Amino acid sequence: MINSKSIYADLTALRKNVPLVHNITNFVVMNNTANALLAVGASPVMAHAIEEVADMVRIAASLVINMGTLNPQWVDGMLQAGAAAKQKGIPVVFDPVGVGATPYRNQVATQIIATCQPSIIRGNASEIMALAKENIATKGVDSTIAADSALEAAKRLADQTGAVVVISGVEDFITNGEQVISIKNGSTLMPKVTGMGCTASAITGAFAAINENALQAAAHAMAVMGIAGELSAAKVAGPGSLQTVFIDTLYQLSEEEITNTFIN
Ligand SMILES: Nc1ncnc2c1ncn2[C@@H]1O[C@H](COP(=O)(O)OP(=O)(O)O)[C@@H](O)[C@H]1O
Ligand SMILES: Cc1ncsc1CCOP(=O)(O)O
Ligand SMILES: [Mg+2]
């Protein structure tokens, strides 16, 4: 369904079109995700004020909503931005950071899915299980379970919401409820850098801006994440340098590297 040629074709389209990706994201990752979006070829803007989100959506090619550090004002902004994105017809990517950890996060995630109707939801296995209302003990923003154990829950969530659902982890799974694509690239060092999941969601927003097929766009984004993470991890001593080398690797990512590294 996807291959190294289709990944590179979308990456080339992204670099050529430089789509504006509007992010309403958390305090922890704003800088990393903006830099990752620039490096992959997109143009990021971070804007959360209720007074401007709808106007920003009007000039954006996609919207990424990430609920990592919530407060009620931001939630209002997310809901307004999501409604404006639906009206304009641009894709919405939702990252339900930490859902399952607190009742407030659960309530906000439900509200965002209902109002913003995301075309892609990306989370780790614990988050996807929590969204699918599975009984799961979560541990803040990190997953406590393997991605494959959330696959059935992800398919159900895709059926319920109409969104493509991505579970990240050792292996990533991307499903529309029927088809499933898996990506085996990545590195055990990636979850040691905060914001790698948020970066995956932001980059998914960039690919969704240039490919109308949400399943393909999400799979291409996760493949690029995994390939760049794997190539970067081979060059570094630990998570500190992974963060910066990852940005350089994304920026330089070539067709040859994709062809030689991609595994699914
Ligand atoms: N153990 C692992 N081995 C390989 N890649 C991983 C591993 N854990 C996470 N990744 C990769 O790191 C990125 C972030 O995923 P993850 O850590 O699941 O997200 P989150 O930070 O939201 O919990 C994804 O691209 C995923 O494929
Ligand atoms: C640590 C933390 N706390 C609230 S948001 C956040 C960042 C989570 O990022 P990711 O899910 O990509 O690791
Ligand atoms: Mg996360």
Image (cartoon, rainbow, N blue to C red):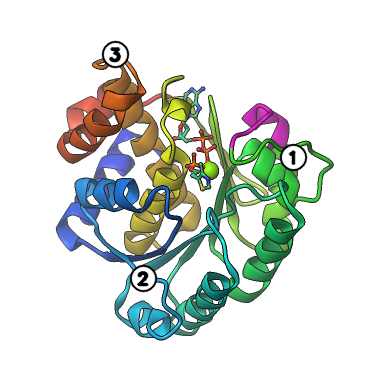
In this rendering, would 199 be left or right of 96? left
Q: CA distance from mark 1 to mark 2?
A: 35 Å
What x and y, as percent, mark residue 192? 45, 26
The mark nearer the N terminus, 1 or 2, is 2
The reply to whether callout 1 and callout 2 are in contact (CB within 8 Å) is no
Q: Is residue 177 magenta?
A: no
Disc number for residue 47: 2
Q: Residues within 10 Å of mark 2 (few under 14, many from 20)?
A: some
What x and y, as percent, mark residue 129? 73, 43
Residue 191 visible in the picture: yes
What x and y, as percent, mark residue 34? 29, 53
Q: Which residue is mark 1?
A: 152
> On the image, which quarter does residue 118 sit in?
bottom right
The mark nearer the N terminus, 1 or 3, is 1
Residue 264 visible in the picture: no
Amino acid marked by disc 1: Glu
Amino acid marked by disc 3: Ala
The answer to which of 5 and 67 lies nearer the viewer is 67
Disc number for residue 70: none
Q: Is residue 98 above or below residue 188?
A: below
Q: Residues within 10 Å of mark 3 (few under 14, many from 20)?
A: few
